[in-house]
Image (cartoon, rainbow, N blue to C red):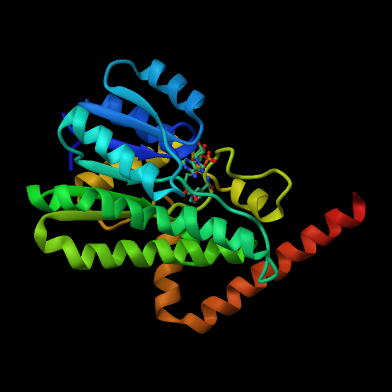
Amino acid sequence: MELRDRVAVVTGGARGIGAALCRRFAEEGAAAIIIADLDRAAAEELAGQLGAPATARECDVRSEASIVELVRATRERHGRIDLFCSNAGITVSGTEETPDDDWQRLWDVNVMSHVYAARAVLPSMLERGEGHLLQTSSAAGLLTEIGSAAYSVTKHGAVAFAEWLSVRYRRRGIRVSCLCPAGVATEFLKEDDAIHQFLATSALTPEDVAEAVIQGLADERFLILPHHQVAEFFAFKGEDYDRWLHNFSRIAQKLDRIANRREATD
Ligand SMILES: NC(=O)c1ccc[n+]([C@@H]2O[C@H](COP(=O)([O-])OP(=O)(O)OC[C@H]3O[C@@H](n4cnc5c(N)ncnc54)[C@H](O)[C@@H]3O)[C@@H](O)[C@H]2O)c1
């Protein structure tokens, strides 16, 4: 899909990767860009910077009603949605001991939001026989995020749902792309998290990610991997799962040692 004259919705669009997507879609000549975010003020600020094609909308992707209203209002104003970017996502560091409330929060934002978006937007796309869904997962959805069990599991869920949608609707004109970056320099990467600091050393900018998305959408590619290392690790995982597990557990051990040393000196 080329963005010129398209109507695009971006959840989590006020900051980070979502904001870079909105900026880039504006440069590409999109007809309308709906910046949907929990943070209305930040969405309005970005819409103000982007001018005419951009509109801000408050939306909580944890709520199906909020996504239904986002889709309804966009279709009423612009007639259609060509591209729906389900991009909002959150994390929490922790192991299997992560409290149930946090597991549920990540499940709702990182998985169910994609389900709600598909339910809301697919009927009109299927009726027109075209439409593109961009689901932001993560490298953690193909590999793992050593510091967060809940993030790894829910991002795997996001990849699984994107795959399922692609298999199910490809022949009816629907394209699905799944964005799986590793570290990206946004507020998402926390300075007090050893794994996030490690990811920050090879982080791309949100603009790099937006460039990869533009290319991936133009090529109608399913997996969009801005970091070439992720493609290599994913291929290696497919070739030799046990060696991949062995290598990642060594990295986990090293990062634990760094975190323990830091705690001891604090
Ligand atoms: N930054 C990274 O290193 C990285 C790496 C891989 C994947 N990702 C994924 O990319 C996506 C965007 O991450 P980012 O780095 O831009 O994060 P960010 O924290 O910079 O921005 C996220 C945006 O989502 C909004 N948001 C959060 N919860 C929301 C909700 N319930 N409803 C609507 N909006 C909500 C926030 O207000 C914020 O504007 C996420 O899905 C994240 O998991 C990020």
Q: Position of residue 116 (x, y in %)?
A: 34, 53
Q: Where on the picture, by quarter, is residue 214?
A: top left
* Residue positioned 11% across, 55% down in the render: 173
Q: Is residue 235 above or below residue 198?
A: below
Would residue 201 be seen by someone viewing this image from the given angle?
no
Q: Where on the picture, by quarter, is residue 187?
A: top right
Count of labels shown?
0
* Residue positioned 16% across, 55% down in the render: 174
Q: Which quadrant of the figure contains the N terminus? A: top left
Of residue 116 and residue 203, the one placed in the foreground of this image is: 116
Of residue 46 and residue 224, the one placed in the foreground of this image is: 46
Of residue 41 and residue 207, the one placed in the foreground of this image is: 41
Q: Position of residue 154 (x, y in %)?
A: 49, 63
* Residue positioned 43% across, 66% down in the render: 157
Q: Where on the picture, by quarter, is residue 162?
A: bottom left
- Horizontally, residue 247 falls left or right of residue 46, namely right
Q: Is residue 141 above or below residue 177?
A: below
Of residue 61 and residue 147, the one placed in the foreground of this image is: 61
Q: Position of residue 28 (x, y in %)?
A: 24, 28
Would residue 185 be seen by someone viewing this image from the given angle?
yes
User: Given the current orientation, which residue lies at the most extreme front position?
Assistant: 65
- Horizontally, residue 244 falls left or right of residue 158, namely right
Q: Position of residue 177 (x, y in %)?
A: 28, 54
Q: Is residue 121 above or below residue 104?
A: above
* Residue positioned 38% across, 50% down in the render: 64
- Horizontally, residue 92 falls left or right of residue 182, namely right
